[in-house]
Image: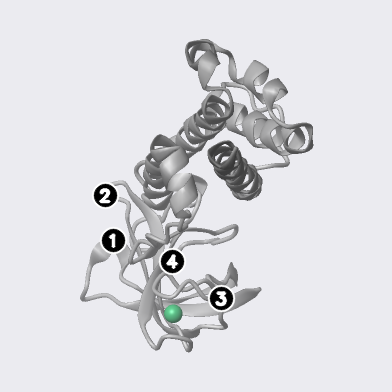
Amino acid sequence: MTKNYKLHYHPNLNLEKETTIELKSVEEVRICPHCGIATSPTFIDGYLIGDNNSYIPPTTYIIFHCPSCNKLYIAKYYIPHDYYITNDMMPYDFSPIFPSCTYPGKHILPEFTENIKQLSPMFVETYRQACYAEENEDTIGLAGLGYRKAIEFLIKDYLIKVDPDNKDKIIKMQLGKCIDKLDEDIQDIAKAATWLGNDEVHYFKKHSDYGIDDMKDFIQCLVTDIERYYVKLKAREFVNANDNATK
Ligand SMILES: [Zn+2]
């Protein structure tokens, strides 16, 4: 949903000069970084900063109130560099304008079950690091690489659990070949997650209609499937052990 916002603007960061700027059709940042709930937040105040003399590009900070948790958060918006502010003058155009991040940082990490933590501690740790990279403006470009690496740990650790005799072979095997060894009904979801992960690593993006959020959806689904197989495997081990004990 887009909104119009009236913002304070001090030309070239001169606090003695203040004017008001109206930004039109700005994408509302609805997800609160405190509680993670999407609401229709209340606009509290907003500032546009920019300084031609110091080459600070025009950037907007808007303070919102979240009606769900009653806390304030700040959304930061970039304005493309073409729209530099001219000295002491009002900016001539402010569209398009893009939300870039929210403060405080989100730090909403998915919880993995004890089974997944036990099966692949490196998957859980790498996924956590990728989440942090994604939440931090300075490292967001590295998040995709992290998620791709996490997928590899999950799939290989699962295969090693299923087939421990071939551990050394699985460790060195290409990920594509590992996916072929997975149970047939989870191969597609593993492929989809991996292909999008590869897009994040390589120079050329083959699947430009998909992004990190899609990859994370596929990873979550893969985790659920692998968790299911892992529990079945544990049950089989338990039954076999007790069968042998009762013979
Ligand atoms: Zn909230």
Quarter of the image with the C terminus is top right
Q: Are marks 3 and 2 in contact (CB under 8 Å)?
A: no
Judged from the image, the secondary structure of the residue bearing numbered disc 1 is helix
Q: Between marks 3 and 2, how big is the CA–CA gap? A: 38 Å
The answer as to whether callout 4 falls within 8 Å of ligand 1 is no
Q: Name the residue under label 2.
A: 53
Residue shown at 42% from the left, 69% from the top:
33
Q: Where is residue 66 in the image (x, y as percent from the top left)?
A: 45, 83
Residue under circle 4?
90
Q: Position of residue 57 (x, y in %)?
A: 37, 51
User: Residue 196 placed where, x, y %?
Assistant: 64, 34
In space, the residues marked 3 and 1 are separated at their CA atoms by 34 Å
The answer to whether the residues at label 2 and label 4 have Cβ atoms under 8 Å apart is no
Name the residue carrying label 3: 38
Q: Which amino acid does label 1 sit on?
A: Asn
Q: Residue 173 carries which label?
A: none
Three-letter residue code for mark 2:
Asn
Q: Residue at x 51, y 83 (%)?
A: 41
Is label 3 within 8 A of ligand 1 (CB to nearest ligand atom)?
no
Residue type pointed to by label 4: Met
- In the depicted structure, whether residue 183 falls above or below residue 74: above
Q: What element carries label 3?
A: loop
- Mark closest to the chain's N terminus, 1 or 4: 1
Instruction: Classify the position of ligand 1 by quadrant: top left, top right, bottom left or bottom right.
Output: bottom left
Query: Would residue 127 be found to the left or right of residue 238 on screen?
Result: left
Where disc 2 sits, the SS reads loop
Kindly check if marks 1 and 2 are in contact, taking CB atoms under 8 A apart as contact.
yes
Q: Residue at x 66, y 73 (%)?
A: 1
Residue 127 visible in this rendered orientation of the protein: no
Question: Which element type, helix, strand or loop, lies under badge 4?
Answer: loop
Question: What is the CA distance from the residue labelled 3 to the residue labelled 4?
Answer: 33 Å
Residue located beneath label 1 in the image: 12
